[in-house]
Image (cartoon, rainbow, N blue to C red):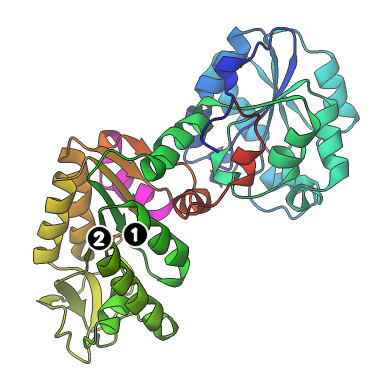
Amino acid sequence: MLNKKSVDDINVKGKRVLCRCDFNVPLKDGKITDENRLVAALPTIKKLVSDGGKVILCSHLGKPKGEPKPELSLAPVARRLSELLGQEVKFAADNEVVGANAKAAVEAMKDGDVILLENTRYRAEETKNGEEFSKDLAGICDVFVNDAFGTAHRAHCSNVGVASLVDTAVVGYLMQKEIDFLGNAVENPTRPFVAILGGAKVADKLNVISNLLEKCDTLIIGGGMAYTFLKAKGYETGSSLVDDEKIDYCKEMIEKAEKLGKTMLLPTDTVVAKAFPDPIDGAIDVENVRSEAIPSDMMGLDIGTETAAAYAEAVKNAKTVVWNGPMGVFENPTLAKGTIAVARAFAETDATTIIGGGDSAAAVNQLGFGDQMTHISTGGGASLEFLEGKELPGVAAANDK
């Protein structure tokens, strides 16, 4: 899965190139409020344009559930992309996505032109990988380029179906970067390799914990899921978030770490409060207590100061670090200290630092450390499945080198 052909391995001059991007951007009153995903797609688009391809872009946006929804049209994306690219990105308005209007727009293209198709999820077949829509997409292109890592863990028409129907299917620069960093970090890391997992629930990370224990040298646990591990060790966890059904699993993982000779770090102290903050960023009274002695009427909401220092130290001594999930309720200034300490350690280390998408990506960006990371993944669910060691359909569908 790590050795795929990319846009650098093909010649697209004069060819119709369908490029699947991730333009699933937040919109407010028809305006894009965060254009990171558009900017991230530019290198691949520019490469295809400069090589003389006829570039047909496609993406989903939101969840229109198989029918046209004007508020989820990609028209605003075409307008903003035109500005970012410095050339017109023609919008092929077409509720069928590949209907008469889109086909006519493709037919009229010259080398180096760019058009954007309508939201692929306007078609009900898209999320079911239905054959008819896959054939429609394959019918308007000679080459397929997948640059949408955020949907790589799903088998849809616009990433997997179309790839199976064209002779040339490759990955774009963004996808290549994800494979290089996320894939190789887990399969061929420079050691010591430290993995940090946080977030609320153990259930979301079951296979990730197990897979990373086999690959890394040190596994660090923080966030809400740490309390299920602490309870598995027989500690009093008060009113903290605990998944009682997963206590035996946590015991197994603690034993697995010992058996494999891996270091598993759990919080030795924790920041507690009487209740979850309401509103989430509101003022809150907290205290720092030992992890084995959380008062029965208190809940853990962040790692403590001693734990934050220990986790930061482990990061500093690593050569490769992967992080998925915040250490506490980072949306609250009082409860963000653990996450900030880890983010700062990431920013200061010489190690290869990889942020596995989702909340941890939001956290490092919001805290101002984003530009100091080696790689921030663009996929939430896709990153997690990569870290689980699963094959991602969207990556697997591309031609091997």
Which numbered disc covers residue 262?
2
Q: Residue 113: x, y in percent? A: 69, 13
Give the number of the disc on residue 213.
1
Residue 47: x %, y % from top left: 56, 14
Assess disc 1: are there few (<14), some (14-19) or many (≥20) residues with their C-alpha within 10 Å of its C-alpha.
many
The overriding secondary structure of the stretch rendered in magenta is helix
What residue is rendered at 62% in x and 12% in y? 49
Disc 2, SS: loop
What's the residue at 44%, 67% (across, down)? 206
Residues at badges 2 and 1 in contact (C-beta under 8 Å)?
Answer: yes
Quarter occupied by the N terminus: top right
Q: How many marks?
A: 2
Amino acid type assigned to the residue bearing label 2 in the image: Lys
**Mark 1 is on which residue type?**
Leu
Q: Can you give x and y, in whole percent of width and height, for residue 287 in the image?
A: 12, 76
Question: In this view, which residue lies farthest toward the bottom?
Answer: 296
Position of 6 compared to 361: left or right?
Answer: right
Q: Which residue is at a point 17% across and 73% down the rendered structure image?
A: 271
Can residue 287 be found in the magenta stretch?
no
302 left or right of 98 in image: left
Front-most of 283 and 269? 269
Magenta residues, start to end:
358-371
In the image, 23: left or right of 345? right
Q: Which mark is residue 28?
A: none
Looking at the image, residue 303 lies above or below residue 399: below
Q: Does residue 191 appear in this view?
A: yes
State yes or no: residue 360 in magenta: yes
Question: Residue 46 appears at what percent x and percent y?
Answer: 55, 15
Are there few (<14), some (14-19), or many (20+) residues within 10 Å of tag 2? some
